[in-house]
Image (cartoon, rainbow, N blue to C red):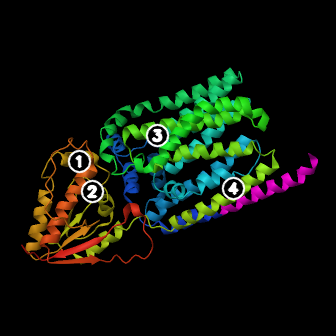
Amino acid sequence: MKRFLPEKAALARCEFAAATLLTLFLIFLHLRLLMHAGPLWRDEINSLHVANTQTVHDFETALVFNPFPALFAAVLRIWIALGFGNSDFHLRILGFIIGLSLIGAIWLSCRWIDKRWSAPLWPLAMFAARAMTISDGDSLRPYGLGMMCVVLVFALIWKLTFETSRIGTVVLAAIVALLSVQSLYLNGFVAFGICLAGIVVAVKRREFQSAAVIFSIGIVAAISLLPYAGIINSARELWPLQREERGILDASHSYLWLIFAACAFALIVVPWATHRLGHSLGLSADGILFAFLAVAVAAIATFAFLWTSGVPGSRHLLPMMAVASVSLHILSGALRKNIGLRFLNLLAFLAVITIVIPVAYRWSSLRRTDCDLAAVAVAQRSDKNDFAIVMRFTHAITFARYYQGAATWKSVPDISDHRQHRWDLARDAMMHPDSIREILWRIESTLKSGQKVFLVGRFPKAESAPPAPLPPAPQSGWRLFVYQNNWDKQIAYLLRNHAVETERVALGEKRPIDPREHEEVFAFSGWHD
């Protein structure tokens, strides 16, 4: 046994060096993202509006269209009050600080779990180094704050499960759990999985006092969400409108269903396997049971909610992924006694980072939007008698922030509020078969008068015949994208068949743009029947 001690010490130093180097490189990526992200995009402008509301009523109303609890808006409001709201760059510094804090939370959580400073190889490689974690975690949205809190919740509940409960740890766990669910609603499902894992393992170990403490922490966190019941109920009516044409749980993403099935399978098999095989493999059966229960329950609850609600966006999976990465650290840590497995673990880590780092490096250079450039281009090339169309009402949030031109403009559909994602106003447009008739008339009259029409967004391909307006929803099941595509085709048919000249306007940006808000601008002039 002693002859392996030098090798184990050398491996430990290699692991720590690898984790340290990766951490330094991740700091560089966060800094690179800060320097390249540029202006705010629509989701971040939504957050800014919520933080700047002036009355309690306006704040509660804004939360209906902002699918998060109040904590991040409060943090952002404090940041602005400190004098950092004068520019987009100063606002982005807040996201940068939160992104770095997430890395620190990963190191600290692994320190609490291992009771010593150890290399968090897998949380860094499988989670912190992911492009989505860096990009969304540093955005002016609550994802970074929520991920940081849920990682700390995992480690603190672990401490309460496996160590003698101290009042300081209990208070800190309660505070962090509260902050976690107040950052992201979906953190409630993840926190539920973590607390349930702690309670099950504590009862198994006959630590009933620890189980009661963890149960109390979970109850307090759950109760803190009760004031949002009315807001969630109002927002729930708008969830079907946000369904994407190809959602994250569609058949095209069947691998996610495999993950879901694997979690359900693990929930049944792992307790049995750790009991039967843990001792022979030299693993901590209770530790592995805790990790798998937390991940499996969190995954099942998260996927079930996303599937039933239809809420889009793979970034909603980030809290679950954060917990899964820390759980993987526990599993890999349980194998440290075997020098061969430990060496293979290090090699696997190096192989993974060679895959994830290039992707993260590319994403860190993306400009978050070029809709601001589209707004400037339209303003510079238009006069007060021209007309501009923004093909997506959600993208019009960004356009409205940066447009300072004289020409009149409208979104598709034409809604009255471009400070947030007003799904309710889009729903009203779906109730009228001729909801874009005024836009079509304005295009025709502008071109006939010798003026220009500017189109911001995607210009659909030509149709052989004019598409018929759709009947009022909910015949479509409130699928907004069906109506949006129909409106796009009506506008495109009119412009392609009646505009004399079509010019694509260059925006002059050479840097790559985030595909979630990458715009094109077209100018149309002249009219023929």
Depth check, mark 2 against mark 4: the one in front is 4
Q: Earlier in the sequence, mark 4 or mark 3?
A: 3
The quarter of the displayed image where residue 374 is located: bottom left
Q: Quadrant of the N terminus?
A: top right
The one nearer the camera, 296 or 38, is 296
Q: Which x, y percent locates residue 526? A: 12, 77
Q: Which x, y percent locates residue 58? A: 32, 43
Q: Earlier in the sequence, mark 1 or mark 4?
A: 4
Check disc 4 and give the amino acid type: Ala
* Secondary structure beneath label 3: helix
Stretch in magenta: 1-24
Q: Quadrant of the C terminus?
A: bottom left
Are dots 1 and 2 in contact, CB under 8 Å? Answer: yes
Q: Marks 3/1: CA distance?
A: 28 Å
Check disc 1 and give the amino acid type: Leu
Check disc 3 and give the amino acid type: Phe
Q: Earlier in the sequence, mark 1 or mark 2?
A: 2
Q: Earlier in the sequence, mark 2 or mark 4?
A: 4
Q: Marks 1/2: CA distance?
A: 10 Å
Are dots 2 and 4 in contact, CB under 8 Å? Answer: no
Residue holding disc 4: 348
Residue 391 vs 312, above or below: the answer is: below
- Residue at the spot 14% in from the left edge and 72% down from the top edge: 385
Residue holding disc 2: 393
* Secondary structure beneath label 4: helix
Residue holding disc 3: 303
Depth check, mark 3 against mark 1: the one in front is 3
Q: Marks 2/3: CA distance?
A: 28 Å
The one nearer the camera, 26 or 301, is 301
